[in-house]
Image: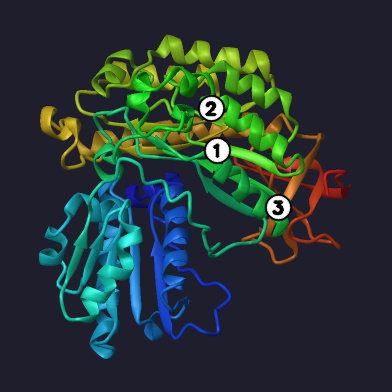
Amino acid sequence: MDFEKLMEKTIDETVQGSNLAVRPNPENTKKLFIESYGCAMNFSDSEIVASILSKEGFNTTQVLEEADLVLVNTCSIRDKAEQTVRKRLEKYNAVKRINPKMKVGVLGCMAERLKSKFLEEEKIVDLVVGPDAYKDLPNLISEVEEGRSAVNVILSKDETYGDISPVRLHTNGVTAFVSITRGCDNMCTFCVVPFTRGRERSREPQSILEEINDLWNKGYKEVTLLGQNVDSYLWYGGGLKKEFSKATDMQKATAVDFALLLDMCAKAQPKVRIRFSTSNPQDMSLDVIKTMAKHQNICNHVHLPVQSGSNRILDEMNRQHTREEYIELVKNIKGIIPDCTISQDMICGFPTETEDDHRDTLSLMKVIKYSFGYMYAYSERPGTMAERKLEDDVSFETKKRRLAEVVELQRAHGLYRTEQFLNQTVEILIEKESKKSASEWSGRSAHNTVAVFPKEDYKIGDFVLVKIHNCTSATLIGNAIGLSENN
């Protein structure tokens, strides 16, 4: 398989785009075209941006050519994601030659990383806005409309956008993201997130519960609690997590950690499925797993990025866990929730990685047997500690081979895990029409496994009991036998 195609097949949302549109406000006269690339947080941020700009007279549109303002929400996690954005800017430029009044802005992590340099590199770009500056968009747009370029990439110490009700974009009306934290303190040497999204800060619990209640009232059936590192969630009425030591005794006594927040969310709406992403092995508490076990509406799935199976490489990555600690954590998770599915992130070809290190990764995978995973060849990111301190000394061909071996093993393990559902009845939340057949629905189980089955008289948003009779390495195939009692 071609290496670029292999990369695309292993990437979840890192280079996927979505142009978004919602029901227009008849009083708005301007049109916004917004496209998102990268992690789920970027897609969530785009909903915040749409909400802010709706109050400034913008309705979203799916037609690029009719837009007054075009925004692209960007990702910097890998070079391929950045190159995808630059290609999209070429497309915008072609449209702008026909419609010179159209303004173009770059949002998100790529904007934060490149800052004003973006205006020099991409002549088409009129404004550059970092992830913590979206509330300044009305002012920045005013500057652009007056003929000046505009940049705001200042990182905040306390912004969570918890006071903004997101406009749900490109939605199926069934599932939604709810952001609970922003930023990251972990400083993995390969990652740009601490530099593009700043330090960790958590959103006030009541605003999270109010958003979940609002989603339930609007007919949503599932929410994903979202953060770069959800297990670091900590609300004590203060600011950054690292300042918790300065909190008062009362603040410490009434603090809400992630296990407690998860419990509060599950109790607030017992019929809403609750998921969360992403976890960090060094921060995950077994109290979280015990909370999952206590509530039927919390999904039995943990996305637990490991990145490598080699202790030496984990140390080079500044991951604050060892191979042994990771395996012990998974063992303890399975001890509390035996059928909990585990998924992974894996980097192949990190600087100095040897064949022995690579074999350690493969052997770790054989121990865990992940249900699914997101696997990548290492891509050096400017400004990271790895870029500054380590030579990218693993050849392209070696990265390609190692990634192929990891993907092949994951497919085998994925099939092993899906086969465990054969002849079982699984509850599936219908999310959309199957990509492969207009006569079938597609949805996910509580284990985050995709299932497809004939439509019959069911509809999007139904919880359906499906008897599984076949599977692939990533998909369950079955027939619906009735509605679940959770409807």
Q: Secondary structure at mark 1?
A: helix
Query: Residue 262, located in which quarter of the rendered image?
Result: top right
Three-letter code, disc 2: Val
Counting from the top left corner in percent of width and height, residue 221 is at 71, 50
Mark positioned earlier in the residue sequence (1 or 2): 1
Which residue bears the numbered disc 2? 256
Q: Secondary structure at mark 2?
A: strand
Query: Residue 301, located in which quarter of the rendered image?
Result: top right
Mark 3 vs mark 2, foreground winner is 2
Counting from the top left corner in percent of width and height, residue 306 is at 42, 25
Mark positioned earlier in the residue sequence (3 or 2): 3
Q: CA distance from mark 3 to mark 2?
A: 23 Å
Mark positioned earlier in the residue sequence (3 or 1): 1
Disc 3 crowd rating (10 Å Cα; few below 14, some 14-19, many 20+) is: some
Q: CA distance from mark 3 to mark 1?
A: 17 Å
Side (left or right) of 228 relative to 190: right
Which residue bears the numbered disc 1? 205
Counting from the top left corner in percent of width and height, residue 253 is at 52, 19
Residue at 20% in and 39% down: 380
